[in-house]
Amino acid sequence: MKSNRGIGLYVHVPFCVRKCRYCSFYSEPVGSVDTGGMVSAMKAELGRYELGEKVDTVYVGGGSPSCLPPAELFGLLDEITNRCTDLKEFSVEVNPGQVDGEFLCGLRERRVSRLSIGGQSFVDEELVFLGREHTADDILRTFEFGRKAGFSNISIDLIFAIPGSTVDFFRYSLESVIALGCEHVSAYSFSIEPATAIGRACEHGEVVKVDEETDRAMYEMAIDELEGVGIVQYEISNFASEGFECRHNLKYWSNDPYVGIGPGAASYFRGERYNNIADIGKYCELIENGKSAKVDGHRCQGVEAACETAVLNLRKRTGICLTEFAERTGYDAMELFGETVERYVREGLMEVSDEDGGRICLSRKALAIADGILCDFSSV
Ligand code: SF4
């Protein structure tokens, strides 16, 4: 796979104040671990890569980066800005209620250019159900603090189809993000993960999933309402005003290289996909002893790499650019996937155009059922 684009750097801060009831990501309660030791290990891991000006986007996520003691988070961000000198985008995730104006000014001083707020819902009873630590008012306050600190690029995450939710609840959340005037919105359908408090409640019949029709109606509403105010869908779950698409996340969908730092972080670097060990103690021990924190690795090549690229590219509304696909993978996408594409075009689920040397993309009708369609591109 050829790529001459900049590298993305993902920094995974694996701490949260406490576990949300729906979350299956790897994280530990912030009070239970030596966060300072972990941050030192992460700085050391970053130093080993010697990425310098090759990195052009950084995303610090988690977990919950904003629950780290500010001095530790700022120390980590200083290390990043000192090492990565040619950044085009620098995002940090924050949780509402965990940050104030001073904290956000501290981020700006470290050249953080984009704030991603984990809002999830503007309906307090949904936030309680999810086990979030914050209220809807906290989201509004965090947004205002962000603007006052000078952030002109703010994203808010929303979850729809939360058990017990209604179309009106979700409309209220959408109207709230629109009223704030943020530049970017991520909207995900609620997914019930078995190894979570809500997953267990669902198994016991105490929580009932939102039906498919309502889930779909909420998704369609997100596309219509956001596009109505110029926040345009550019990926299955992501929407942005023109020029505010997340450059870092676009790397994932373009199958560009990225390096993940921290316990549990994933990387796609020098043609290999791998993960760091998802255990803070073991991660620190490995790094302190000069060893790699990598626990697995897979080199994706040939047709397999081409299929992977197709699946990722199709998540973007612009889909697969045929000339770029051929340059990067060495394959003609129409030759590889011709029959599948033709079938979906007949069903009105895909579109083929001559734009930019040829494109294949999902139709609007296909977006709500995209996962099933993308499966058909994962192998030939
Ligand atoms: S704050 Fe985020 S990462 Fe942490 S438990 Fe909640 S959803 Fe998961």
Image (spheres, rainbow, N blue to C red):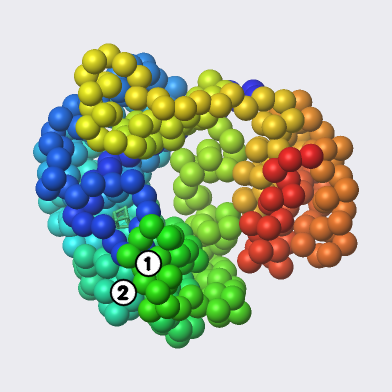
Q: Amino acid at mark 1?
A: Arg
Q: Nearer the viewer, residue 323 or 39?
A: 39
Q: Amino acid at mark 2?
A: Phe
Which residue position is annotated with label 2?
Answer: 129
The residue under the point 74% across, 40% down is 379
Q: Position of residue 269 (x, y in %)?
A: 50, 25
Q: Nearer the viewer, mark 1 or mark 2?
A: 1
Q: Earlier in the sequence, mark 1 or mark 2?
A: 2
Q: Is residue 142 visible?
A: no
Please tell me whether residue 84 is drawn above or below residue 209 in the rendered image: above
Q: Quadrant of residue 163?
A: bottom left
Q: Quadrant of residue 179?
A: bottom left
Q: Nearer the viewer, residue 119 or 369?
A: 369
Look at the numbered discs 1 and 2 and tell me whether their residues touch, using CB distance below 8 Å.
Answer: no
The residue under the point 34% across, 37% down is 278
Image position of 185 (left or right of 63): right
Mark 1 C-beta to ligand 1 under 8 Å: no
Quadrant of the image for the N terminus?
A: top right
Image position of 250 (left or right of 126): right
Q: Position of residue 180 (x, y in %)?
A: 35, 69
Image position of 374 (left or right of 343): left
How far is the residue under mark 1 from the one under mark 2? 14 Å
Q: Nearer the viewer, residue 375 or 220?
A: 375
Q: Is residue 304 visible?
A: yes
Please tell me whether residue 83 is drawn above or below residue 33 in the rendered image: above
The residue under the point 38% across, 79% down is 206
Which residue position is annotated with label 1?
Answer: 200
